[in-house]
Image (cartoon, rainbow, N blue to C red):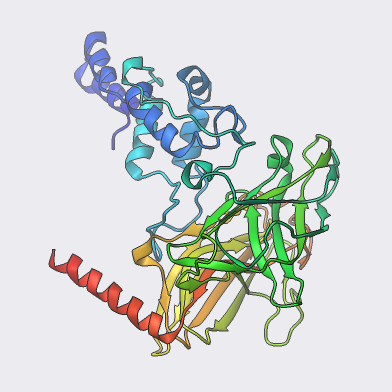
Amino acid sequence: MIQIRKLISFCLRVFGLGAIAIQAIAQNAPTYSADVAPILQEKCATCHNPEGIGPMPLTTYEQVKPFAALIYDRTSKRIMPPWHVDPGIGIQQFKNDASLTNAQIDTIENWFNAGAPEGNPADLPTPIEFPSGAEWQLTEQLGPPDLIVRSTPYDVIADGQDQWWMPNVPFEGLDKERFLKAAEFKPSYPLGKKVVHHGHAVLQPADGGRSVALARYGVGKSWEIFPEGTGMRVPADGSIAWNLHYFPVGAEGPGDVVEVGLWFYPEGQQPERETAGEVMFRVDGLKGMARGQDIVIPPHGYQVLTGTHRLDAPAVIHSYRPHLHMRGKVMTMEAIYPDGTKEVFSQVNKYDHNWQIAYIYEEDVKPLLPTGTILQFTSVFDNTASNPINPDPEQWVVFGRRGVDEMSHAWVGMTYINEEQYAQAAAERRARRETLRID
C-alpha cells in the first residue's frame, strides 16, 4: 500500500499538483475519530486507560496525538499489542486474540503519515467504561466471586532483586466439595499490578490428596474460565500455598495482599468433565535429569532444548502459555500422533518475559488428542546482544527462578477425558467440519 506522504510527494513531483489537490488527498486519509479510535478502543484501551496498567491512557485524541509516532512504531513492528504467536504456523483462532490485522496496521500507518488528523468527533465510537484495576474483571460476566481467598500481607521493597512471598494460609469458606468454573487472580491496585510478575495459589487438601491449583497468574493472564460442562474439583478443607513473584519497581508498598476470586458450579452439580486447569510440561531436566540441569547457555550464544511427554489418556487442550525468562525467545508445542503423523499447534516466536500470555483456543480448533499422543515442546534461548531484553550477554546462564536465570516449561490448559468422551467429541467435530464443507 502506498503511504499517504509518498503519494503526496509522488503527485507533486510527477503531476505538479497544487495545494488544493494535495488537501483533497489528505482528506481521504484515515482519521482518529472514524478509523483509529475504534482500533485503539478494541485492542489497546483495556490496558491504556486511566485505571489500566499501561504507561499512558489512549482513550481520547488529546491523549493519543502526542504518542502518534510511538503508536505507529510499536504497531508496525507488532510489538504492541503484546501477542507473540507466530501468525504463519499452527492454530490461529483464539478467544483472546489481541493482535492487530494487517488492515488495522495499515490504517494506523496511513493515519500517522497523514499527520494524525483528528477528524469529526461525531464519528467517535461509543465510549467503553473499563473496570478499575481494583475491581474483579469477571464480575460483569459472572457476577461477584462466590469465595475470595487472600494472601498474608507482604512489604514490597522499592529496589532490589526478584522477591518471593510464599505464605501458607488456611482454606476456609466451603462446607463441602464443590466444582470450580472460573478463577481470577487479583494483585492489589495500583502497586500490586506493577510488582506482581506472576504467581500461584495452590490448595493442599487436608487429607493429603492431590494438590489443586486454584489460580495461576502472569502479566497478561489474570483469569481462567473453564469450558461449558468442565470444572475443577475443589475439596472443602486444606490450606493454600501461595507462591508470589514480586519484582521491585522503585516504590515501596507495605502490607501488600493478593486476592483470588473463585466462581463455582451450583452446589451439588457435577460437570461432565473434570479438569486439572493448567498443567506444567517441562522442556528441561527430563529422562532422570535434575530439573534445569541441562540449561547451560554460553555467552553470546544460543541453546535449544526439546522435551517430550506421552499422554496416557485422551485429552483436550484449551490453552497454551510458555514460560521462559529473559533469554527465552521461542517455544513450540506440537503433537506426534500414535500413527506417526505430526502437527504443530502453536509457536511463540517472539517470547517476551515481561508478558505471560495464555493463548486460549477457540472451541472448534482445540487440539483433541487420543491416548498415546506425544506432546513435544521445543525452546530456543538467545543470549546474544541482539536479544533486546538480555541484561548481560557476557554471562553464562543456568537454571534458576530469578528473571536473569532461566526456566523452560509450558503451562497447558488441559482436560483429560475417557475413551467414550473422546470418541463422542471426535465424531461431533467431524460432523461440524463436514457441515461446514457442504455449506
Residue at left 45%, top 46%?
A: 98
The N terminus is located in which quarter? top left
**Image coords of residue 426 (percent x, y):** 33, 78
For residue 107, what is the image quadrant? Answer: top left
Q: x, y percentage for residue 79?
A: 52, 44
Left or right side of 130 for 200: right
The answer to whether any part of residue 404 appears in the image is no
Residue 226 to residue 14: above or below: below
- Look at 51% across and 38% down and name the residue there: 74
**Relative to 108, 327 lies left or right:** right
Please indicate, yes or no, whether residue 156 appears anywhere in the rendered image. yes
Whether residue 280 sits left or right of residue 241 in the image: it is: left
Q: Relative to the observer, which residue lies in front, 157 or 294?
A: 157
Tell me the quarter of the image containing the C terminus.
bottom left
Question: In the image shown, does 238 or 305 lie closer to the viewer?
Answer: 238
In the rendered image, residue 359, in percent from the top left (x then y), is placed at 49, 58
What's the residue at 59%, 77% (across, down)?
Answer: 306
Residue ranking furthest to the left: 438
- Residue 31: which quarter of the image? top left
Above or below 68: residue 169: below
Question: Which residue does the image show at 59% across and 48% down from the upper left?
Answer: 145
- Rendered position, 237 above or below 403: below
Above/below status of 373 relative to 171:
below
Residue 251 image offset from top left, x and y in percent: 81, 34
Of 97 and 187, nearer the camera is 187
